[in-house]
Structure formats: structure tokens, C-alpha cells
Image (cartoon, helix red, strand yellow):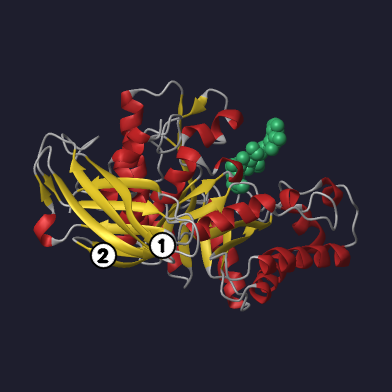
Amino acid sequence: MGVLPLADGPVLRDLADARGITYGTAVTASKLTGTYGELAGAQFGSVTPGNEMKWASVEPTRGSYSWSGADRVVDFAAAHGQKVRGHTLVWHSQLPSWLTGGSFPPGELRTLMTDHIAVEAGRYKGRVDHWDVVNEPMNEDGSLRRSLWYEQLGESYLADAFRAARAADPDAKLYVNDYNTDGLGAKSDGLYNLVKRLLAQGVPIDGVGFQAHLIVGQVPSTLEANLKRFADLGVDVAITELDIRMALPATDAKLAQQKSDFTKVTTACLAVARCVGVTVWGFTDSDSWIPSTFPGQGAATPYDENFVPKPAHTGIAEALGWTGGGDPPPGSSCSVTYTVQNEWGNGFTAALTVRNTGTVPLDGWTATWSYGAGQQVTQAWNATVTQAATRVTAVNLAYNGTIPAGGSVNFGLNGSRSGTNPPPTGLLCTTGS
Ligand code: G3I
């Protein structure tokens, strides 16, 4: 496992970059190795910790913090040149029992909230690009949820939370995030009016996140119009927790419908200028909350449980402009090898070979990989090589983009290093210009 799905096919993060948006995924910190880590690093431009930044995870006992999971995700993102969506500072759920079980007077509760924000957002200052400052503040009827925060502090808890987050990390984009607010309706009307009120009070709110936990065949037809009306308030918008569940077992027909649904959501974001991106809530069916919460349902993400991309993955890629072919690209595939040829004090030379392993001529190729020990490309030949943090992308030049079936092309590079020079991870070849 691992070789097949990484060997070829579209790379969502690159396609999304080219369209000016970010395609991200929620991740589980403890799984970020092996194929899971390689795919998370190679395919996605941002990561959101699925649970590791929630209050119960970071401060299970009052005053005693546990940052290891959250740190792991933030470090992973830095190592792979990815953004981080911080999730989440103020929510009614996954709170530690010392907080839900304590009976704090309102003044103390407000200070607990703003201190928590100062500590957590302060710790990751400059390393988290977006914060879900307040998560799920709405009821289904569009009124404010009677959470611990609202019950004790009233609506002002939202303004205080955003102000505390801005003070803790002035450069992070601050979001309110909710579910069942994806299309037009009572709940999204309530959220819209809330955001409008907050903006009118000068509350530092930069964006609205739409979770988009959807059901196959039921993408709201008003999704784009809804994103647009929020954007017209002068805030960014993002799809933050996309998954599209179905009754199991998955069939070809359901997977085809799901492909069209993922395409629709991605297209809606692309159609709204202030939509900054889409995040899937887990990229593989083996790491999705759906089966445990909705028994009998699942298959909600773009990769199956064995990390094989599903039609949904192709649908996202096509929405992002991928024209590399069908599902998988017919007869078109490539592989790439990487060999260190020479090493000296603080440098090295590597030789790479791209091979056409398909049955049709290759028209354009891209090789990508990640360095794990701080290596930095300093010079390259026979390819255009760029590096963002640890992630390297090599694209063919005009004269060596076409490779006959069975043929190969060589390119090379010089790099700097400050110690050991382990081979790169996530070495991947994709076809198409
Ligand atoms: O870590 C423990 C493990 O030690 C234990 O053996 C196991 C037994 O149940 O539970 C594990 O914790 C679970 C945790 O996920 C980590 O897997 C919790 O029970 C489970 O409740 C928790 O679920 C998370 C859920 O939020 C909680 O509400 C999901 O993973 C997470 O994907 C989900 O994410 C939320 C977003 O934050 C907000 N929007 C909705 C979304 C889906 O519910």
C-alpha cells in the first residue's frame, strides 16, 4: 500500500493553488506518518487538527496544558509548506469537565474564556493562518445557541472572543464557523444577521466558515448564492469541514453522485471571489467521524479506507481545472526515481529519472517530493525546480515534456544540507502539462 495511490494522478493542492484557493484537510495528529502522512502532505495545502486544538484536548485539567497533538499538526504543516486552520477556541462541545462542571460566576467565566484564547492563540501566533474563534453559535431556527457561553455571558461573548483572538495573534484570520448554514435558510439567515451585527460593532471578524457536512445528492442549490451574500458583507468565506456521506454499502452509482457533489461544492467556492478554499473533514474514509455518529453511513471522503482515490477525488480535481483524463487517466502514468550522486560538506547532487510507465506518450510531467532534513535546492538542470518549505516541485521544460511510452527523461539538482541527507519522502510523478 502507498505506492499505487501516490504513483500518479492529480495533486489537489497544486491545482487549487493555480486557481487561487487552498484545498485542505482535517487530520488526526497521531496518524501523520506513512501513507496517511505522505498523502496529507502532498495533496493538501492546509491542515486542520480534527480534535487536537479543542479545549478538552489542550487543557484537560485546569491550568495544566497538553500541546503535543496540536504541536504535531502545526509542525507537520510547517514541514510541508502548508497553512493551518486552528479549530477551535470557543465551542459548546468538547469542553473539559472542570469547566462544564464548575459553576463559575459570569465575570470569572468571561476571563476564563479570554485567557484561554490568549494562551492558545498566543502559543501559535504567526503559525496559524485562520482561527475558528467561535464554533457553532447558532440554533437551527436562526437564534443563538443556548451554550454555556451564551447562557452566562449573552451575545457579548462573541465580540469578546474575537477581540481576545485579535490581540493574541493580530495576523491570523478570525472566523465564525457553523453547520447547516451552507444554503439559504433560517439558520444561515441568523448567522448572516449575527455577522452583520458584529461587523457593525467593529468586532474583528475576518471570515465565515461553512462546515458542509452534506449528504449524497443533497448539495444545497443555494450554496453559491449563500457564500456570495456573506462575502458581500466584506468578509472571506470558506468551506471548512466538507464531507458527503451515503448509506453503506457504497455503490458505483452513489460514488458517481458523490463525485458530482464534490465538484459542485468546489465549483461554488471557485465562483465566489472571497471564497479562500475548501477543507475536507478527513481525506480518507478510514479517518472520518461519520460511521460512528451515523451508524450505517459513511464513505464520505475523497479517498477510500485503503487510500485509493475515489471518483470524488477526480471530481474535485476536474472542478479545479484538471484535464488529465478520466478515472484513472487512461493509459497515462509515470514514475520518478531519486538518487544521490555526490555529497560534500554542506552540499549534494541528486539525479532524477522520470519514466513513462503508461501505454501512451506522455505530454508534460511534474515530480514532487518533500525533504525531511532541511535540504534546500540551490540549482537545477533539465527541469524547472521550485521549493516551498520542504516541498519541492519539478516541472518539465519545453524540450523534454514529451516522453514516449516506455521512455525516460533525466534531470538533476544541487542542494545544500546542514547535516544528514536522507532520501526524500512522498516522491510522486504526475502526468499532464
Ligand atoms: O481519543 C478517544 C479514545 O481514546 C477513545 O478510545 C475513543 C472512544 O470513544 O474516543 C476517542 O475520542 C473521540 C475523538 O473524536 C477522537 O477520535 C471522541 O470519543 C469523539 O467524540 C470525537 O469526535 C469528534 C467530534 O468532533 C466531537 O464532537 C470527531 O473526531 C471530530 O471529527 C468532530 O469534529 C466536529 C468539528 O469539531 C465541529 N463540526 C462538526 C464535526 C463533526 O462532528
Amino acid at circle 1: Cys
**Is residue 264 found left or right of 25 in the rendered image?**
left
Which residue is at 43% across, 29% downward? 306
Q: Is residue 278 visible?
A: yes
> Is 66 situated left or right of 241 in this image?
right
Decide which of tag 2 and tag 1 comes sooner along the chain.
1
Quadrant containing the C terminus is bottom left
Camera-near label (2 vs 1) is 2
Residue position for label 1: 275
Look at mark 2 in the image and give the residue it sits on: 380
Circle 2: residue type? Ala
Locate residue 374, reporting x and y percent: 47, 62
Compare residues 378 and 310 and report the one nearer the observer: 378
User: How far apart are the two marked residues, 2 and 1, measured between alpha carbons?
Assistant: 36 Å
Q: Residue at x 48, y 33 (%)?
A: 285
Quadrant position of residue 154? bottom right
